[in-house]
């Protein structure tokens, strides 16, 4: 379908005043045909005089001349781009390990550089055409988030399950030449891309700093539904402890050598190893926080601030749901917050029955997991659920259990809170008001 479908028009905007309607299609801007919303943003970014080509639902074509103030938006809203599908067959792909019966979008594997730029999605670049590489440079689509996994070409093909892929270092060097900022990740698979191979990958990527601005090493995730797939070794507590002992000093040495925070180990390594996190200053501006790097220490730092400022709220019991891996520091926060507020706050560590006990993060818990954990638990006046467990804007869990169903099964009010100490404290105060 040509052009961009206009999903909505902001009331009172330029487009609204020119009688553009939802359902129209924007075909071109100043003669430039539009492929997606990135093209739209690029071609409308700085021009104050625009020529828009609009197609009405009946096929009628409009040409509209627009004069606007610098930076004034047109008021056109478009749906998110349909993601390009991933053609890789990664050994550790989480989607391949999902059980049946979940929402269909969860089984979609995307590999789209546009979503990397727009949303911070990680892409391998293994399916990138030269024309797309040129577009990234021309339109300066920066930053990008890139799954490297290994800079050894042979090993990388094995990890991605795909032959004849472009050499990743060549691609990164071309992007660096175009002044594209990149954040990289390695999904660590014990006995495959660790040890000497990880040394090579880290060294190669550090040589591209500051174009490659950060590198996160995260452990692979294995579920109990892994069937007829290559055998992989999980990261356990012993491995994690050895890994942190080896790589934390190297990360600090790299920080001094390149002049900035570069190499980060995922929080999960420290949680599995039962070891303290680096100082918060060592995370820089938290470039990899959405990748599970620095979330826990940042939580603990904010928790101390919230407890220090907390005031008495009332007298009631409430239960706060958390994943197994975050239970320790969440429980510590709730105990201290309870002392300051007068509340009886009970953390509830929920075991992941959907994916298996090796999956311990809060964001992958299902509604049925929570319901099962409540069977022998005194919930109190309310059950607090962090928003990372729910589909954004919909209010349902991975297994399609709704908040209403959870509330019915819990036998008390269910409150969703922003997954931060401040969010939890705010939700508790709101319970008293309502």
Image (cartoon, grey):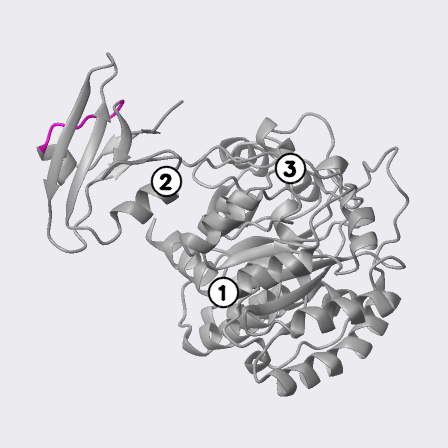
Where is 290 relative to 396, above or below?
below
Q: Nearer the viewer, mark 1 or mark 2?
A: 2
Q: How many marks?
A: 3
The secondary structure type at the circle numbered 1 is helix
The magenta stretch spans residue 22: yes
| Res. 188 in view | yes
Where is 47 relative to 265, above or below?
above
The secondary structure type at the circle numbered 2 is helix
Does label 1 or label 3 sit earlier along the sequence? 3
| Residue at 51 percent of width and 76 percent of height | 304
Q: Nearer the viewer, mark 1 or mark 3?
A: 3
Q: Which residue is mark 2?
A: 37
Does label 2 or label 3 sit earlier along the sequence? 2
| Res. 345 in view | no
Q: Position of residue 113 (x, y in %)?
A: 53, 46
Q: Quadrant of residue 393?
A: top left
Where is 139 relative to 327, above or below?
above
Q: Position of residue 96 (x, y in %)?
A: 75, 36
| Residue at 64 percent of width and 39 percent of height | 366
Q: Which residues are magenta?
A: 18-23
| Residue 372 as seen in the image, left or right of residue 11 | right
Q: Which residue is mark 1?
A: 421
Q: Position of residue 171 (x, y in %)?
A: 62, 56
| Residue 62 as seen in the image, left or right of residue 156 | left
Q: CA distance from mark 1 to mark 3?
A: 36 Å
| Residue at 49 percent of width and 57 percent of height | 316
Q: Which residue is mark 3?
A: 86
Label 1 crowd (10 A; few <14 / some 14-19 / many >=20)? many
The magenta stretch spans residue 294: no
| Residue at 85 percent of width and 73 percent of height | 242
Magenta span: predominant SS is loop
Q: Position of residue 300 (x, y in %)?
A: 57, 72
């Amino acid at each position: 379908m040509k052009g961009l479908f206009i999903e909505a028009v902001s009331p009172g905007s330029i487009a609204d005043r020119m009688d553009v309607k939802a359902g129209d299609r924007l075909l071109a801007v100043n003669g430039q045909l539009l492929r997606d919303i990135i093209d739209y943003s690029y071609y409308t970014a700085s021009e104050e005089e625009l020529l828009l080509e609009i197609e009405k639902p009946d096929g009628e074509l409009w040409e509209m001349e627009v004069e606007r103030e610098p930076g004034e938006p047109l008021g056109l809203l478009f749906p998110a781009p349909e993601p390009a599908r991933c053609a890789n067959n990664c050994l550790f792909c989480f989607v391949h390990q999902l059980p049946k019966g979940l929402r269909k979008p969860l089984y979609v594997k995307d590999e789209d550089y546009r979503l990397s730029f727009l949303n911070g999605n990680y892409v391998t670049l293994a399916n990138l055409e030269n024309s797309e590489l040129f577009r990234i440079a021309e339109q300066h689509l920066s930053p990008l988030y890139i799954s490297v996994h290994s800079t050894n070409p042979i090993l990388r093909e094995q990890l991605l399950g795909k032959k004849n892929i472009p050499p990743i270092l060549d691609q990164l060097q071309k992007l660096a030449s175009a002044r594209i900022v990149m954040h990289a990740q390695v999904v660590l698979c014990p006995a495959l891309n660790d040890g000497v191979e990880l040394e090579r990958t880290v060294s190669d990527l550090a040589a591209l700093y500051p174009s490659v601005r950060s590198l996160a090493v995260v452990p692979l995730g294995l579920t109990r539904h892994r069937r007829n797939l290559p055998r992989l070794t999980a990261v356990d507590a012993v491995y994690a402890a050895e890994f942190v002992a080896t790589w934390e000093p190297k990360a600090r040495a790299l920080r001094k050598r390149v002049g900035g925070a570069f190499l980060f180990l995922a929080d999960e390594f420290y949680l599995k190893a039962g070891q303290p996190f680096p100082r918060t200053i060592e995370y820089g501006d938290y470039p990899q926080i959405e990748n599970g790097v620095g979330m826990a220490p940042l939580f603990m730092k904010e928790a101390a601030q919230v407890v220090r400022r907390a005031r008495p709220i009332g007298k009631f019991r409430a239960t706060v749901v958390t994943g197994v891996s975050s239970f320790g520091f969440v429980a510590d926060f709730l105990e201290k917050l309870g002392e300051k507020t007068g509340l009886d706050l009970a953390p509830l560590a929920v075991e992941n029955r959907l994916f298996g006990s090796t999956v311990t993060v809060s964001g992958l818990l299902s509604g049925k997991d929570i319901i099962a954990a409540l069977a022998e638990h005194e919930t109190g006046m309310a059950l607090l659920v962090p928003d990372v467990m729910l589909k954004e804007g919909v209010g349902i869990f991975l297994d399609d259990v709704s908040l209403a169903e959870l509330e019915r099964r819990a036998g008390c009010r269910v409150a969703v809170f922003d997954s931060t100490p401040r969010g939890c404290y705010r939700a508790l105060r709101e319970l008293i008001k309502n």
